[in-house]
Image (spheres, rainbow, N blue to C red):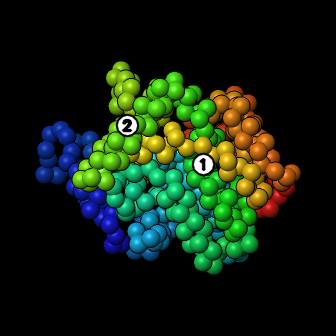
């Protein structure tokens, strides 16, 4: 596969072939787990067909182009050979496809739903410069292109296309759904809904919010003036090393994300997440307000949340009430926390059947 991400893939592969310990001309000490990897970076052993067959679904490594930039995704295709509902999804801030969306996609495919996860532009295996730019408007455009790609596939029913937003991805999913008539069903899970109240919840004071936005604007101005891209950490690198300048400073967020930065040879299946974000991205996060878009949602809506999910219980309920009509449903899953919606099998196994029924056309 040729594309702008090949340099990063090759560099990663080259960077993980060395094995620490005693050198050996034969089998290295430690057996197969110490042998390292060779060849180009791959998240899975895709083979020449870029497809893996499974007992319940097949998964393909696919690409599509958005405004001249190559986007890389994984398409989950349920077995059976009939046209099925199809869903494109966005995950948390600066996510890669192998993170939270992946667990939803595998389970949706088992439920008979075609599911597409992808690295948005500027992230993971996809192209786009500068790297790790978080731009909600661009993500909404990427999502629209993903929906267009799904509509071309013979396995999908073009009259049953849907959108799924997880965590901060809900904001750009909402933005796209508000303008996209093909998005016939919308689901929002554990949303980190961006509002002024959310910014205060995470940053503490109006002064801190103002300072973050000012920092972001200064970084954007430097990029416009001379092309310099400044970065900040998404989370602190170690539990004992707080970083008040990181995007997200809560320790549980660090505990979830930091293992994804591992570039060991046996972690390629985790994708290409990096613990950094372009500093100019922050204004589009802490300065964003999704509230005005909620009354424009006309598609049937399923919102799944919990008391300890990202934006707390009150903000999602307020936003839900802004959606007109009765083709909507809010499901609160008790005291579950945000990380459970990312990786807890029991929580995902509760949520995904709700999503599948929704995307199949069941009552909102």
Task: Name the residue that disc number 1 marks.
Answer: 171
* Foreground label between 2 and 1: 2
Q: As rendered, which of 298 and 304 lies closer to the eye?
A: 298
Figure quadrant of residue 246: top left
Q: Position of residue 208 (x, y in %)?
A: 46, 27
Q: As rendered, which of 146 and 223 lies closer to the eye?
A: 223
Asked if residue 111 can be seen in this view, the reply is no
Q: Is residue 298 left or right of residue 113?
A: right
Is residue 16 placed above or below 200 in the rendered structure? below
Q: Badge 1: few (under 14), some or many (20 or more) residues near its Cα, within 10 Å? A: many
What residue lies at 13% left-to-right and 51% top-to-bottom?
Answer: 25
Is residue 249 placed above or below 117 in the rendered structure? above
Residue 215: mark: 2
What residue lies at 26% left-to-right and 62% top-to-bottom?
Answer: 7
Q: Secondary structure at mark 2?
A: helix
Q: Is residue 29 left or right of residue 5?
A: left
What residue lies at 39% left-to-right and 43% top-to-bottom?
Answer: 217
Q: As rendered, which of 79 and 11 lies closer to the eye?
A: 11
Which residue ends up furthest to the top in the rendered image? 240
Figure quadrant of residue 175: bottom right
Q: Is residue 135 left or right of residue 17?
A: right
Q: Position of residue 226 (x, y in %)?
A: 24, 53
Q: As rendered, which of 209 and 143 lies closer to the eye?
A: 209
Separation (CA) of disc 2 from disc 1: 22 Å
Figure quadrant of residue 239: top left
Q: Position of residue 62 (x, y in %)?
A: 48, 69
Is residue 124 placed above or below 318 in the rendered structure? below
Q: Secondary structure at mark 1?
A: helix
* Quarter of the picture holding the N terminus: bottom left
Residue 211: mark: none
Q: Position of residue 155 (x, y in %)?
A: 64, 75
Earlier in the chain: of badge 2 and badge 1, it is 1
């Amino acid at each position: 596969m040729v594309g702008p991400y090949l340099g990063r893939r090759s560099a990663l592969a080259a960077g993980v072939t060395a094995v620490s310990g005693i050198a050996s001309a034969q089998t290295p000490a430690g057996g197969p787990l110490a042998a390292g990897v060779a060849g180009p970076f791959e998240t899975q052993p895709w083979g020449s067909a870029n497809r893996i067959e499974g007992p319940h679904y097949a998964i393909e490594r696919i690409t599509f182009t958005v405004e001249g930039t190559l986007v890389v995704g994984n398409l989950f295709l349920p077995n059976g050979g009939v046209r099925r509902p199809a869903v494109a999804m966005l995950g948390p801030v600066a996510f890669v496809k192998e993170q939270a969306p992946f667990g939803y996609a595998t389970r949706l495919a088992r439920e008979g739903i075609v599911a597409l996860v992808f690295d948005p532009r500027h992230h993971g295996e996809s192209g786009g410069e500068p790297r790790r730019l978080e731009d909600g408007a661009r993500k909404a455009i990427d999502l629209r292109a993903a929906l267009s790609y799904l509509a071309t596939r013979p396995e999908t029913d073009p009259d049953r296309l849907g959108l799924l937003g997880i965590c901060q991805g809900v904001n750009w999913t909402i933005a796209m759904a508000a303008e996209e008539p093909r998005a016939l069903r919308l689901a929002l899970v554990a949303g980190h809904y961006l509002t002024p109240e959310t910014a205060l919840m995470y940053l503490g004071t109006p002064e801190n919010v103002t300072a973050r936005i000012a920092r972001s604007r200064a970084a954007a101005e430097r990029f416009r003036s001379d092309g310099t891209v400044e970065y900040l950490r998404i989370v602190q690198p170690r539990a004992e090393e707080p970083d008040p300048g990181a995007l997200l400073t809560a320790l549980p967020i660090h505990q979830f994300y930091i293992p994804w930065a591992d570039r060991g040879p046996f972690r390629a299946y985790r994708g290409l997440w990096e613990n950094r974000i372009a500093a100019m991205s922050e204004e589009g996060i802490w300065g964003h307000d999704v509230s005005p878009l909620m009354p424009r949602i006309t598609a049937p809506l399923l919102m799944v949340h919990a008391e300890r999910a990202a934006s707390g219980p009150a903000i999602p309920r307020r936003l839900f009430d802004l959606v007109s009509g009765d083709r909507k449903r809010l499901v609160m899953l008790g005291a579950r926390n945000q990380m459970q919606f990312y990786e807890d099998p029991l929580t995902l196994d509760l949520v995904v059947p709700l999503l599948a029924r929704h995307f199949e056309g069941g009552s909102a």
